[in-house]
Image: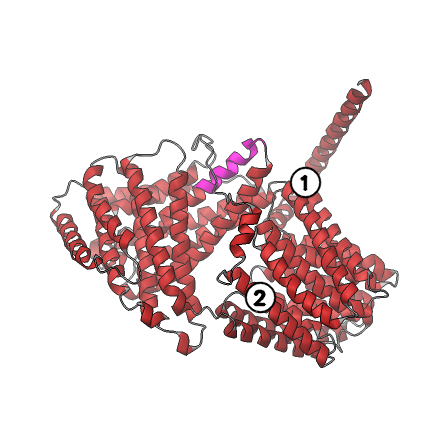
């Protein structure tokens, strides 16, 4: 027992010495003028940080072996590190350890299987196809498995490429798995230095996407009808990006919450996440037809002021996003407070009371500004909010995918057939490095036709450009050292562009591959023309498979997506009504879930319409109606968001508000494609209600606060338009 306490004391002393040394180094660095700008620049670029980490791992693994005249070993280790970086999951450090164990196991199985089956092409082709289905279905179990299984498929293909130049069949398996393990350990060590860095990055991306949304929305003030339509279309696409960022934040937050026994360190990040969701709801809300308000000369000055405030708020949100990454304390812009105060002063000067159409919008901006000011107030939300979680078991998640109707099963079979056909072409024609056909299909073949078509052009153009640039630079850098530097530079720029612009990233991965084969076997330049041919074949296989095997044309999906949008909007509206009936005193978990599902349904509609533009013209059925319905649904969601964002004002005269709101809700609940016959009579009643609300708004006779009456009137009118415009989508026309 005495030895145990002595050991614990030694460990504590060692930790204290480490902390003291770290503090001394930090104090020394802080005195250097160059340090702070460099530190901020380093931490403020997550993509570059990821690129630097991956390139460092590849450099450590590659340089010593190339210097010792054993380039194959160094290059193969580097490929393993590359695959490890591409398959890295956004997870808590404990989750990363589990992912790393799974990764090493799956990478080893995949690459060893390739080595064992390589003398038997038929078995290798069948194994490649069947394992692809298995890996993709396992990837559907969760985000952690998705990254690992993608990496396992990628390493298997890399092993097929490397085995020809390997001294023995097993070296690619050992080296690639070791390279992935090394990268994973390096990533964990760096994560130990800042364990909450991943959370900060995801939240920063979310706030940055929100800032872009605010910036675009500012263009509505002032605007005409044409400009408003264009801006709202851009806002719908920006909302897709923003909701995607929110979902990624939630997943990372969930992984941290599951890993931590004490959630105290997580509370500040949860507070930021709740603020992000709250600001998103306010930003997505619409209170009036801003093009109509812009036509009134009396509103011109106010409208321009609101536009300027939205730009300033966007800058403030970007500043906070920057502070999350760099650790620089956020300072709320004083100019924003002055602008808000000036707007209120103008309201008084122009004698605009609470009944003015802009009053609710100005109230919304004021509350958003106050929320940003109070970021440091830990008492904003004393209750730790609950996060949504998938409570299904792993077996249940797997069973849910075991159907030909499931999109993931279809994609798995489609990709598997792509691989086997590509491998058969490569073997039958004895193509040099024909495995690139399979590799190209992996990256190009996506679940939908439009995504695959987009990837096809990006991959082919990027490869052509990469081949031309790479061959020219290789001629200028004929030495081993020069090509090694070019390889590392290509790696860095590949990861820097991967999340921002895929076509640019393809250029650098092409030059990376050129250097790999030039260093390992002096065949890099000679292999570029076969690579280009294989890229074209793999891309064509991907587009043909998506078009022939379960082509999910968007006009067929639209009725289902519209029904989902009706359902989720109704649930969101119901949650809002519940908040007006019983103002929340604790966590608003059910409300947040309903709002998120409504935005996801809206985003699915927006993406379906966008994807339809890339489909063959003969499959672009009801294109104009699709655009109109997408536009109307997004507008309806904006007005629902406005009603929800002001739910704290609903305590007064809530009964008068709830009666018409519940009737509109009943219409949305029954709305579906094909439209029920009994809904025709209710449509007339809804029209009468909308007219009545509009008349009360004009006369000022309603007990409902005028601002909320306006929003409710818009909800009624848009619900009526949506029900009317869905008539062309009957089952006969969309089959």
> Could you say which is closer to the camera, residue 689 or residue 135?
135
Q: Is residue 561 left or right of residue 152?
A: left
Q: Which residue appears at 41% of the width and 75% of the height?
A: 619
Quadrant assignment, res 121: bottom right
Q: Nearer the viewer, mark 2 or mark 1?
A: 2
Quadrant assignment, res 543: bottom right
Q: Main secondary structure of the magenta part?
A: helix
* Mark positioned earlier in the residue sequence (2 or 1): 1
Q: Where's residue 303, x and y in %?
A: 28, 53
Answer yes or no: is residue 466 visible. Answer: no
Q: Where's residue 144, x and y in %?
A: 60, 50
Circle 2 residues within 10 Å: few <14, some 14–19, many ≥20: many
- Of all residues, the one furthest to the right in this rendering is 68
> Could you say which is closer to the camera, residue 725 or residue 467?
725
Q: Are marks 2 and 1 in contact (CB under 8 Å)?
A: no
Which quadrant, please, contains the C terminus?
A: bottom left
Assess whether residue 264 is covered by the magenta stretch. yes
Q: Which residue appears at 42% of the width and 54% of the height?
A: 600
Cα gap from disc 2 to disc 1, whole angstroms: 40 Å
Residue position for label 2: 413
Residue position for label 1: 192
Q: Where's residue 185, x and y in %?
A: 73, 47
Whether 433 is drawn above or below 673: the answer is below
Which quadrant, please, contains the N terminus?
A: top right
Assess whether residue 140 is covered by the magenta stretch. no
Q: Where's residue 407, x and y in %?
A: 50, 61
Residues in magenta, as a range: 261-274
Circle 1 residues within 10 Å: few <14, some 14–19, many ≥20: few
Mark 1 secondary-structure assignment: helix
> Could you say which is closer to the camera, residue 727 or residue 632?
727
Answer yes or no: is residue 82 visible. Answer: yes
């Amino acid at each position: 027992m005495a030895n145990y306490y002595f050991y614990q004391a030694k460990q504590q002393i060692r930790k204290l010495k480490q902390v003291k040394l770290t503090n001394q180094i930090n104090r020394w660095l802080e005195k250097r003028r160059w340090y702070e700008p460099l530190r901020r620049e380093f931490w403020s670029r997550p993509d570059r940080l990821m690129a630097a980490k991956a390139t460092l791992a590849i450099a450590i693994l590659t340089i010593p072996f190339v210097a010792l005249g054993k380039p194959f070993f160094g290059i193969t280790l580097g490929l393993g590190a590359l695959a490890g970086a591409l398959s890295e999951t956004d997870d808590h450090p404990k989750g990363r350890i589990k992912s790393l164990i799974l990764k090493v196991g799956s990478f080893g199985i995949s690459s060893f299987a390739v080595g064992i089956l390589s003398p038997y092409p038929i078995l290798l082709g069948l194994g490649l196809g069947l394992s692809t289905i298995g890996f993709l279905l396992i990837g559907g179990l969760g985000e952690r498995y998705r990254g690992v299984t993608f990496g396992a498929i990628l390493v298997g293909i890399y092993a097929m490429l490397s085995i020809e130049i390997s001294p023995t069949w097993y070296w690619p398996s050992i080296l690639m798995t070791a390279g992935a393990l090394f990268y994973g350990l390096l990533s964990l060590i760096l994560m130990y230095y800042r364990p909450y860095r991943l959370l900060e990055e995801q939240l920063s991306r979310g706030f940055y996407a929100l800032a872009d949304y605010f910036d675009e929305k500012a263009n509505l003030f002032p605007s005409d009808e044409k400009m408003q339509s264009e801006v709202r279309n851009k806002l719908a696409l920006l909302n897709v990006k923003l909701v995607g960022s929110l979902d990624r934040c939630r997943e990372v937050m969930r992984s941290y919450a599951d890993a931590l026994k004490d959630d105290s360190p997580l509370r500040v990040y949860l507070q930021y996440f709740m603020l992000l969701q709250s600001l998103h709801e306010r930003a997505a809300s619409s209170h009036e037809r801003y093009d109509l308000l812009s036509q009134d000369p009396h509103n011109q000055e106010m409208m321009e002021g609101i536009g300027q405030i939205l730009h300033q708020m966007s800058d403030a949100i970007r500043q906070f996003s920057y502070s999350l990454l760099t650790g620089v304390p956020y300072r709320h812009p004083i100019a924003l407070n002055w602008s808000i105060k000036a707007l209120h002063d103008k309201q008084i000067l122009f004698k605009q009371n609470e009944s003015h159409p802009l009053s609710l919008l100005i109230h919304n901006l004021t509350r958003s500004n106050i929320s940003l000011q109070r970021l440091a107030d830990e008492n904003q939300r004393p209750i730790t909010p609950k996060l949504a979680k998938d409570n299904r078991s792993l077996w249940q998640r797997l069973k849910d995918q075991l159907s030909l109707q499931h999109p993931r099963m279809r994609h798995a079979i489609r990709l598997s057939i792509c691989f086997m056909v590509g491998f058969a072409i490569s073997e039958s024609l004895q193509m040099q490095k024909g495995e690139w056909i399979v590799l190209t299909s992996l990256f190009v073949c996506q679940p939908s036709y439009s995504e695959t078509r987009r990837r096809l052009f990006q991959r082919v153009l990027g490869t052509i450009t990469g081949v031309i640039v790479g061959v020219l630079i290789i001629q200028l850098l004929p030495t081993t050292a020069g090509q090694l530097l070019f390889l590392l530079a290509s790696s860095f720029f590949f990861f820097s562009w991967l999340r921002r612009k895929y076509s640019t990233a393809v250029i650098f991965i092409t030059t990376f591959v050129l250097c790999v084969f030039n260093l390992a076997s002096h065949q890099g330049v000679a292999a570029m023309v076969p690579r280009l041919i294989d890229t074209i074949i793999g891309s064509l296989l991907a587009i043909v498979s998506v078009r022939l095997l379960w082509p999910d044309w968007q006009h067929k999906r639209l009725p289902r997506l519209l029904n989902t949008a009706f359902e989720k909007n109704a649930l969101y509206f119901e949650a809002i009504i519940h908040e007006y009936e019983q103002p929340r005193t604790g966590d608003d978990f059910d409300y947040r879930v309903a709002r998120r599902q409504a935005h996801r349904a809206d985003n699915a509609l927006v993406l379906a319409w966008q994807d339809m533009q890339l489909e063959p013209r003969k499959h672009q059925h009801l294109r104009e109606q699709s655009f109109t319905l997408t536009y109307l649904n997004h507008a309806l969601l904006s007005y629902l968001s406005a009603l929800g964002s002001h739910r704290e004002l609903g305590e007064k005269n809530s009964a008068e508000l709830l009666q018409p709101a519940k009737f509109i809700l009943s219409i949305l609940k029954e709305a579906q494609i094909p439209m029920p016959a009994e809904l025709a009579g209710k449509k007339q009643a809804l029209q009468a209600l909308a007219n009545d609300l509009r008349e009360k708004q004009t006369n000022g006779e309603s007990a409902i606060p005028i601002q909320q009456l306006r929003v409710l009137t818009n909800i009624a009118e848009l619900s009526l338009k949506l029900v009317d415009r869905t008539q062309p989508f009957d089952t006969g026309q969309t089959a």
